[in-house]
Image (tube, rainbow, N blue to C red):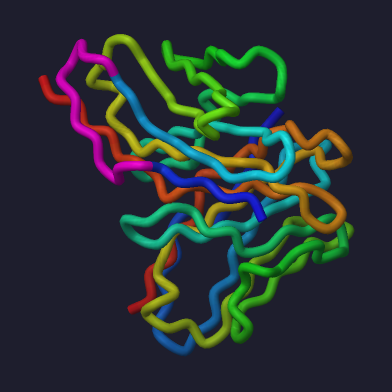
Amino acid sequence: NAGVMQNPRHLVRRRGQEARLRCSPMKGHSHVYWYRQLPEEGLKFMVYLQKENIIDESGMPKERFSAEFPKEGPSILRIQQVVRGDSAAYFCASSPGGPIKNTEAFFGQGTRLTVV
Amino acid sequence: AQSVTQLGSHVSVSEGALVLLRCNYSSSVPPYLFWYVQYPNQGLQLLLKYTSAATLVKGINGFEAEFKKSETSFHLTKPSAHMSDAAEYFCAVSETGTGGFKTIFGAGTRLFVKA
């Protein structure tokens, strides 16, 4: 059973370009979470999605950032018109979800975005 | 809302010494608490979790944590540090949100192990 798969592992974008980060959850997991880790900082929650639904996006910046988790395919975190401050590690996690709140989230290896 | 506070952004111990990483939480309901470890350029790996069963929780790599409700703490310990324990450690709490649960992380504690 493969773990949470994120790609690419490293992404370099010039200011103003778009960045697309992909996350395939573990098999059988229907809940996906995105976190951002700035250098020397902890993980900040961005968004929580279930298939085809955004459940909680309270941590998402209001502009330029969007996320989706379609019925088929991976979850996508999209950053438009990137700026240098977007440089960070972006982690995806997945869980089976449902009413079992003691289920931990399983994390991917992260995508390290560098904006030049 | 629930929250997590990790005391000390950096902790340094000698190899063989006790490791103590502090975590306090705030929650109005019985919490579900976790410790994760992150090695350089890696994702997060679960060390252990508290799910309202035993208050002393044993995890991987010799780590354990004790849930103390009266102190709202969930400190992580290891009797004898090893060089390979050098990493970043995150305490986390499971928070109820609309339709499900999300994990809220502390700011992290970086553990240094000296030879």
Which residue sits at x=65%, y=44%? B27
Q: Is residue B51 left or right of residue A81?
A: right
Q: Position of residue A111 (x, y in %)?
A: 49, 56
Which residue sits at x=70%, y=25%? B51
Residue A37 vertical position relative to residue A104 in the rendered view, above or below = below
Q: Position of residue A51 (x, y in %)?
A: 86, 57
Question: Farthest residue toward the left?
Answer: B115
- Which quadrant does the N terminus of chain A fall into? top right
- Which quadrant does the C terminus of chain A fall into? bottom left
Bounds of the magenta segment? B7-18
Q: Is residue B21 left or right of residue B1?
A: left
Q: Position of residue A9 (x, y in %)?
A: 48, 53
Residue B52 is covered by the magenta coloring:
no
Q: Position of residue A24 (x, y in %)?
A: 70, 49
Which residue sits at x=60%, y=84%? A64
Q: Is residue A41 left or right of residue A54?
A: left
Which residue sits at x=45%, y=58%? A37
Write down the quadrant of residue A45 in the picture. bottom right
Residue B27 vertical position relative to residue A53 in the rendered view, above or below = above
Looking at the picture, tell me which residue is in the foreground, A74 or B16.
B16
Looking at the picture, tell me which residue is in the foreground, A22 or B11.
B11
Q: How many numbered discs, if any?
A: 0
Residue B34 vertical position relative to residue A36 in the rendered view, above or below = above
Looking at the picture, tell me which residue is in the foreground, B31 or A80.
B31
